[in-house]
Amino acid sequence: MASITVPEPFAISRLADRHLIFDINTATYIRREHHICGVLIGNIPQAGQQNIFNGIPLELMPEEARLLVERGHAYLADDVALHLQALKLASKQEKLAYKQGLAQEGKAAAMVQRQEMASRKAKALDKIARSRPGAGSATPSIPSSPALNESSSYWVQPMLVTPTTSSTLIKASPPSPALSLPTVPTSYPLFTHLHSKGYFLSPGLRFGCQYVAYPGDPLRFHSHFLAVGAEWEEEIDLLDIVGGGRLGTSVKKGYLLGGAERQADGGGQDGEVRTFCFEWAAM
């Protein structure tokens, strides 16, 4: 299967201070090319366990969204403003085509459902006919999958379709110049440093850290580090280091602490990022 290429820069939708990607091709592209995983937060209807079977949209951490924007791979788009603008500027022909597309999709779904019901009914009747005493070869067999005639399609009540994406409504998402860069925590220099080294980073809440660092795709590799960022000359409780080291060792990972050096001249630009790894060893 050929790899899908997404033209850059692509849109990252900002909605209620959250950064989302609604296109599946973009989600797989940034994972493959830019080592950005994100978290799938979309729920699948009628799924029993909503904490396992999640889908689009893909939510990005503020650090991930800012990294993509700063490096020119993406831009931020105001999701609400774009939808309102698309509805206001759409012509009558575009609105009519959009409604007709939904109606055709609903009619096709209703036809499929009707054919499945007819097939199940035919199989049930055939089973009943075969179970009757004296039923032999003379008994006419009921077709297992009767084909619906052409005229019957006009009697099908179209199903109501809820669009899962607005790609047919919004053709392109232009950049929103009024949007500022995502606000990131003080651990952002550590995030960019580990990302530049080829690590895949995911939220580290379940391990009591800021990031979980993987040497490759998390679907193929186990994580190596529990990463926590700190500012230069920030006081760190020794118990936090001991606890982090013991926790990392107990889950077969290293506890990584890092931050950016502060410039000697007191400038606002951070210097080189330094990292330290702690492991717990019994004496």
Image: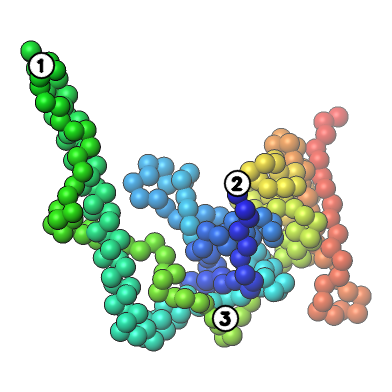
Asked whether 126 or 244 is in front, the reply is 126
The percent position of residue 27, horizontal first and vertical second, equals 57, 59
Choose mark 1 or mark 3, whichever is in front.
1
Of the two numbered discs 2 and 1 on the same chain, state the one appearing first in sequence.
1
Look at 68% across and 48% down and name the residue there: 217
Using the numbered discs, state the Cα–Cα distance from disc 3 to disc 2 in whole angstroms: 35 Å
Look at 26% across and 65% down and name the residue there: 103
Q: Splitting the image into 4 quarters, where does residue 35 fall?
A: bottom right
Residue linked to disc 3: 175
CB under 8 Å between callouts 1 and 3? no
Of the two numbered discs 1 and 3 on the same chain, state the one appearing first in sequence.
1
Taking the image as shown, residue 281 lies to the left or right of residue 50, namely right
**Up-down relation of residue 135 to residue 186 (above or below):** above
Q: Splitting the image into 4 quarters, where does residue 71 fall?
A: bottom right
Taking the image as shown, residue 39 lies to the left or right of residue 118, namely right
**Up-down relation of residue 238 to residue 104 (above or below):** above
Packing grade of label 3 (10 A; few <14, some 14-19, many >=20) is some
Q: Splitting the image into 4 quarters, where does residue 86 fall?
A: bottom left
Residue linked to disc 1: 135
Furthest-front residue in this view? 138
Residue linked to disc 2: 206
Q: Secondary structure at mark 3?
A: loop
